[in-house]
């Protein structure tokens, strides 16, 4: 009876929560380097992404973002990276971003293991390196956060 209850609890609660956690965790990183005057924050929804520079603007910062997740599409990862890029631009008072780099980087991680064991004949030691693939990798995007003069 006890094993049946534990199994049922596992099926109803633990597995769904673990699944939702894995699916919803997107790794998003970003950075900002001020190159101009920081302004009062703007609204994220007011930040416009440009492929070519508008007629009149001031440079505010260099912004970069990346997003990755094993269980999401490349498009979903790019959408998360663009959203973070806009957030960072808005924090420094920009109302636009001129894109200058869109790409992808592999998400491989490296694990290093070391160990020692003692035998009758002496000591043995070893080191190993293991490369583990990380799904779709990371979508990266960067640009110049700008304040467009109207």
Image (cartoon, grey):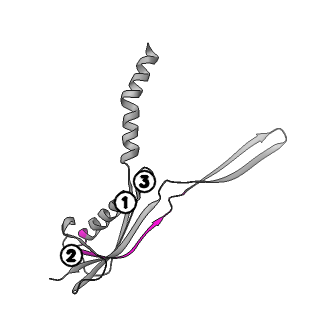
- In the rendered structure, which disc, 2 or 1, sits on the residue that comes first in sequence? 2
Comparing marks 3 and 1, which lies closer to the viewer? Answer: 1
Task: Tell me the CA gap for discs 2 and 3.
Answer: 33 Å
The residue at the point 41 percent across, 59 percent down is: 74
Task: Decide which of 61, 119 is in the foreground and name it.
Answer: 61
Q: Residues within 10 Å of mark 3 (few under 14, many from 20)?
A: many
Write down the region rendered in magenta: 90-108
The residue positioned farthest toward the bottom in the image shown: 55
The residue singled out by tag 3 in the image is 69
Task: Tell me the CA gap for discs 2 and 1.
Answer: 31 Å
The residue positioned farthest toward the right in the image shown: 121
* Label 1 SS: helix
The residue positioned farthest toward the top in the image shown: 1
The residue singled out by tag 2 in the image is 39
Q: Residues within 10 Å of mark 1 (few under 14, many from 20)?
A: few
Q: Is the residue under label 3 in contact with that under label 2 (CB below 8 Å)? A: no
Task: Tell me the CA gap for discs 3 and 1.
Answer: 11 Å
- Position of residue 121 relative to residue 28, above or below, is above
Q: Position of residue 52 (x, y in %)?
A: 30, 81
> Does the magenta segment cover residue 37?
no
Q: Position of residue 112 (x, y in %)?
A: 62, 53
């Amino acid at each position: 009876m006890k094993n049946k209850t534990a199994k049922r609890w596992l099926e109803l609660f633990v597995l769904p929560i673990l699944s939702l956690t894995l699916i919803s965790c997107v790794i998003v990183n970003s950075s900002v380097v001020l190159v101009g005057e920081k302004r009062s924050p703007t609204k994220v929804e007011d930040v416009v992404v440009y492929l070519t520079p508008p007629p009149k603007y001031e440079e505010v910062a260099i912004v970069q973002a990346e997003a990755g997740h094993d269980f999401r599409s490349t498009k979903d990862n790019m959408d998360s990276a663009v959203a973070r890029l806009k957030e960072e631009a808005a924090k420094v008072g920009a109302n636009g971003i001129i894109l200058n780099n869109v790409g992808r980087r592999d998400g491989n991680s490296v694990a290093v293991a070391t160990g020692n064991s003692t035998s009758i004949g002496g000591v043995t030691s070893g080191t190993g390196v293991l490369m583990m693939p990380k799904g779709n990798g990371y979508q990266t995007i960067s640009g110049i956060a700008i304040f467009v003069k109207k």
